[in-house]
């Protein structure tokens, strides 16, 4: 017997009252996108449950994809059975014989949403429980925490039986919390920050600063690959590459070593904010983690943050490095992050950056530069592309730039 559908239980969104249908609609859309690689699969989401009809598709593969979709609390692969008592009896016997192992306990949990069916849920529990005893005479019933819970649902179209419940990714459907711009380096922290933002329903676009020839094509590819890893959680991601060479050279020329980091970060923040505005996004997301490196003291964050009023979300700010690495391994970004390609920040990084930069000094050095011109040229020079879960990076620059301007 093969599974015919997977029944989905929604996560937190079931508590969202009036907005519920908006959440369900978005989740349904995300599931459809993620499962579009399986042409025979059909998806239908109602107010309370989602249904993935397998139509012969391999259940394991679909299950692997489902586990990554935010907004799903759990899901249960189910067998579709003809809505008659003899057919149900035969089915529970076959299923139980297949999964039963010596000493296991069980219970039947029947539910009847089609009230015209001849037996109510209590009668169903009895009749089908008896059928199990006939098939496996030594089996014991247990109401509290049995080894096997056989769920039987009588719906309008048919009856459905399931016995395993698989944990989903939790979180909120991507896109239900609005859009943010993720500052993605090639490091360990920012992809994790992006993943955590996606988990809370924020749709992301990626901004990456590149300083060729100081940074290599390898560093850029790393950022592409990291972005591709994030696409499995929320679908395609727009990747925006910012030319940063001119600014880094200018900073190097005009400011003392100790202030390079602060000035670089302030430029990144200004440019990201400008891009955010054009892309109609609400917040900036980055991978800053308190105390991890010299540029990530509270004083430093304050100096960097001072260039914008836009909320900056720092999902990993209070995490230990090892906690961040754990997540990076889970989401499969760690191995890419540790590839040895120089980031634009490491190249110009001073040995001893200021841990408590003074805004007054920062502004003094910035006054020596054509701030507006530098930012403007960087924003005008951006390259936009769409990164998809499967394919190689697609250059669709023209149409995307059109969208942007
Ligand atoms: P990460 O592991 O994310 O690189 P990090 O611990 O190395 O973080 P920093 O190098 O100080 O920290 O960078 C802090 C944050 O600034 C990064 O998490 C990222 O959000 C942003 N950032 C740094 N470099 C870049 C870059 N080249 N492009 C886009 N964002 C960047
Ligand atoms: Mg870094």
Image: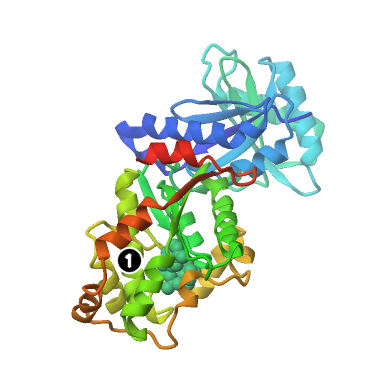
Q: Residue at x 32, y 66 (%)?
A: 267
Q: Classify mark 1 as within 8 Å of ligand 1 or not, answering yes or no.
A: no
Q: Is residue 21 above or below residue 381?
A: above
Question: Which sits in the foreground, 182 or 28?
Answer: 182
Please count the marks in the image.
1
Local crowd size for mark 1, using a 10 Å CA cut-off: few (<14), some (14–19), many (≥20): many
Task: Give the image's coloring scheme.
Answer: rainbow
Quadrant observed for ligand 1 in the rendered image: bottom left
* Extreme residue toward the bottom, this view: 352
Specify whether residue 75 is in view. yes
Quadrant of the rendered image containing residue 368: bottom left
Helix or strand or loop: what does disc 1 sit on? helix
Specify whether residue 354 is in view. no
Q: Is residue 286 above or below residue 385?
A: below
Q: What x and y, as percent, mark residue 289?
A: 41, 72
With 82 as the anchor, is 121 left or right in this view? left
Q: Residue at x 66, y 31 (%)?
A: 78
Quadrant of the rendered image containing residue 246: bottom left
Q: What x and y, as percent, mark residue 166?
A: 61, 44
Q: Is residue 137 above or below residue 198?
A: above
Q: Looking at the figure, which quarter contains the C terminus? A: top left
The residue that mark 1 highlights is 267
Q: Residue at x 36, y 53 (%)?
A: 379
Q: What x and y, as percent, mark residue 20?
A: 36, 33
Q: What x and y, as percent, mark residue 262?
A: 33, 76
Q: Looking at the figure, which quarter contains the N terminus? A: top right
Question: Which sits in the foreground, 380 or 361?
Answer: 380
Question: Which sits in the foreground, 164 or 337?
Answer: 337
Q: Residue at x 36, y 40 (%)?
A: 15
């Amino acid at each position: 017997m093969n599974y015919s559908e997977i029944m989905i239980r929604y996560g937190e969104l079931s508590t969202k009252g009036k907005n519920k249908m908006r959440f369900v609609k978005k989740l349904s859309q995300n599931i459809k996108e993620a499962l579009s690689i399986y042409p025979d699969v059909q998806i239908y989401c109602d107010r309370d449950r989602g249904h993935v009809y397998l139509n012969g598709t391999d259940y394991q593969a679909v299950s692997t994809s489902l586990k990554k979709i935010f907004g799903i609390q759990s899901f249960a692969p189910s067998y579709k059975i003809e809505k008659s008592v003899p057919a149900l009896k035969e089915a529970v016997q076959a299923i139980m014989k297949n999964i039963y192992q010596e000493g296991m306990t069980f219970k039947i949990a029947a539910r009847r949403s089609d009230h015209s069916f001849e037996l109510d849920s209590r009668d169903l529990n009895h009749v089908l429980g008896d059928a199990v005893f006939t098939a496996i005479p030594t089996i014991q019933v247990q109401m509290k925490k049995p080894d096997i819970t056989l769920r039987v649902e009588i719906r309008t179209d048919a009856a459905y039986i399931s016995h395993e419940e698989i944990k989903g990714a939790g979180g909120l459907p991507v896109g239900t919390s609005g859009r943010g711009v993720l500052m993605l380096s090639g490091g360990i922290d920012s992809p994790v920050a992006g993943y955590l933002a996606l988990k809370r329903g924020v749709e992301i676009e990626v901004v990456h600063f590149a300083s060729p020839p100081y940074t290599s094509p390898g560093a850029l590819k790393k950022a592409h690959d990291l972005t591709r890893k994030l696409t499995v959680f929320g679908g395609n991601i727009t990747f925006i590459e910012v030319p940063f060479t001119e600014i880094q050279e200018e900073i190097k020329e005009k400011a003392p070593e100790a202030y390079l980091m602060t000035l670089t970060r302030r430029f990144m923040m200004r440019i990201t904010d400008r891009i955010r505005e054009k892309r109609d996004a609400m917040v900036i997301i980055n991978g800053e983690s308190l105390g991890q490196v010299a540029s990530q003291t509270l004083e430093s964050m304050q100096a960097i943050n001072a260039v914008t009023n836009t909320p900056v979300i720092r999902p990993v700010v209070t995490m230990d490095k090892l906690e961040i690495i754990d997540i990076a391994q889970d989401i499969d970004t760690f191995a890419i992050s540790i590839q040895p390609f120089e980031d634009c920040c490491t190249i110009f990084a001073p040995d001893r950056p200021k841990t408590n930069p003074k805004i007054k000094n920062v502004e003094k050095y910035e006054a020596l530069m054509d701030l507006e011109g530098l930012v403007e040229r960087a924003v005008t020079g951006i390259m936009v592309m769409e990164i998809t879960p499967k394919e190689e990076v697609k250059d669709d620059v023209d149409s995307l730039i059109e969208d942007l301007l």
